[in-house]
Image (spheres, helix red, strand yellow):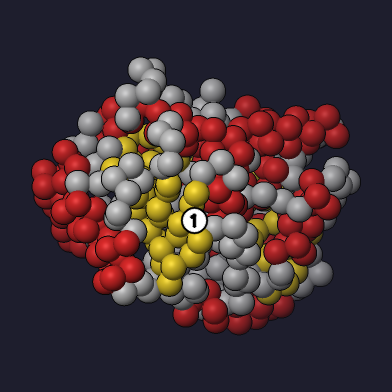
């Protein structure tokens, strides 16, 4: 690593899913975070908490003069959340290209379905032709993220599997006795597939789960509440709304299984929360964090395949898990997906990308 080097991250908002990683990195190097705004309207309305920035230097909607100052040190590495999806990110990216700066990309997968998806694919291929020589590394979430940038045409030597990484509080890390509960946490909308999940649960009489806790708000909240009441399942299915982070962590930690059946999820940080609490997970194949669900940590079903989802819910509702089983999930998560482990991996990516190491690093959760 180069002495005096700083990391400058460009994002649209102060992302609660990236802040713990940035905190960890800032303990070793100077970290600056450039954002368009602290929080977007969607997260404000949904009651998201603004993350603590700690020692990170945060610059909100910088002027042109402030942007120029950010490019004074040629040794600094600028990491952009995508290329052109957000105005402030694209402004910084164009400046980095012009300045011949060191450039990295953080990105989620792109949905290529439909005509809009086809246009996104064409744009990605065009950007690859135009900027490939300027980009030093691409950290893409999950297998789908890696495949996205391969389709664009970037060299596999530049593409690294990435994810989102969170810390739980000391209270959350303690071993909590599991209840025989199923849990979902997320926005109550069509993409998260919450209604098909509830329907499958009710049609199969709840399997052997004693209850099903649903955490979150969204456009389907009222409809779900009526549906559950009309089918006399309000004693077993609880709609909690959106809870503060600490309460969400505690309910996940007490549960015996979390399910995330999304049609599309670039990562799905709730999977991290569950595994760090020792709770196994069922997720669809379009959830980026499904790459974490091997061995006893959970299962993956083909996106949209409700019969397969039903089979796995039945399997896990009847599975006998010991305290040692839950502990092994939690111990694996601490050693594989903590922000500190992600920081070690990220710095290996940097060393490889700039010639300090010859062997391409592998994501710690893959090993």
Viewer-side residue, 3 vs 300: 3
Q: Which residue is drawn at 69% across and 36% down?
A: 334
Q: Residue at x 66, y 72 (%)?
A: 242
Q: Residue at x 11, y 47 (%)?
A: 130
Residue 314 point in image, percent of width and height? 68, 43
Which image quarter is the N terminus in? top left
Q: How many marks?
A: 1
Seen in the image, is 280 located left or right of residue 65? right
Circle 1 residue:
262
For label 1, count other residues whose C-alpha is less than 10 Å away and answer few (under 14), some (14-19) or many (20+).
Answer: many
Q: Residue at x 37, y 23 (%)?
A: 356
Residue 160 point in image, percent of width and height? 38, 34
Viewer-side residue, 200 vs 64: 64
Seen in the image, is 239 located left or right of residue 66? right
Residue 80 point in image, percent of width and height? 34, 53
Which image quarter is the C terminus in? top right
Q: Is mark 1 on a helix, strand or loop?
A: loop
């Amino acid at each position: 690593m180069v002495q005096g080097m700083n990391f400058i991250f460009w994002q649209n908002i102060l992302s609660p899913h990236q802040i713990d990683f940035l905190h960890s990195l800032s303990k070793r190097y100077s970290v600056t975070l450039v954002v368009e705004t602290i929080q977007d309207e969607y997260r404000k309305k949904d009651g998201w908490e603004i993350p603590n920035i700690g020692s990170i230097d945060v610059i909100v909607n910088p002027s042109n003069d402030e942007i120029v100052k950010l490019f004074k040190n040629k040794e600094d590495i600028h990491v952009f959340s995508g290329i052109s999806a957000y105005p402030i990110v694209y402004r910084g990216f164009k400046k980095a290209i012009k300045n011949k700066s060191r450039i990295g990309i953080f990105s989620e997968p792109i949905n290529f379905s439909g005509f809009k998806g086809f246009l996104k694919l064409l744009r990605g291929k065009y950007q690859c032709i135009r900027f490939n020589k300027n980009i030093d590394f691409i950290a893409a979430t999950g297998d789908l993220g890696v495949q996205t940038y391969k389709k664009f045409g970037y060299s596999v030597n530049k593409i690294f599997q990435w994810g989102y990484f969170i810390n739980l509080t000391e209270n959350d890390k303690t071993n909590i006795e599991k209840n025989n509960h199923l849990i979902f946490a997320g926005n109550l909308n069509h993409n998260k597939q919450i209604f098909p999940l509830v329907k499958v649960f009710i049609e199969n009489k709840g399997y052997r789960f004693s209850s099903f806790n649903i955490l979150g708000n969204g456009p389907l909240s009222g409809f779900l509440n009526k549906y559950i009441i009309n089918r006399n399942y309000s004693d077993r299915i609880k709609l909690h709304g959106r809870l503060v982070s600490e309460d969400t962590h505690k309910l996940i930690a007490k549960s015996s299984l979390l399910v995330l059946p999304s049609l599309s999820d670039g990562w799905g940080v709730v999977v991290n929360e569950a595994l760090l609490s020792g709770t196994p997970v069922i997720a669809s194949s379009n959830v980026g964090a499904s790459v974490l669900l091997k061995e006893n940590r959970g299962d993956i079903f083909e996106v949209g395949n409700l019969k397969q989802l039903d089979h796995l819910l039945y399997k896990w509702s009847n599975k006998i898990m010991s305290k040692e089983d839950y502990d092994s999930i939690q111990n694996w998560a601490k050693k594989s997906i903590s922000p500190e482990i992600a920081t070690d991996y990220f710095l290996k990516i940097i060393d490889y990308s700039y010639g300090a190491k010859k062997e391409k690093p592998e994501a710690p959760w893959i090993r």
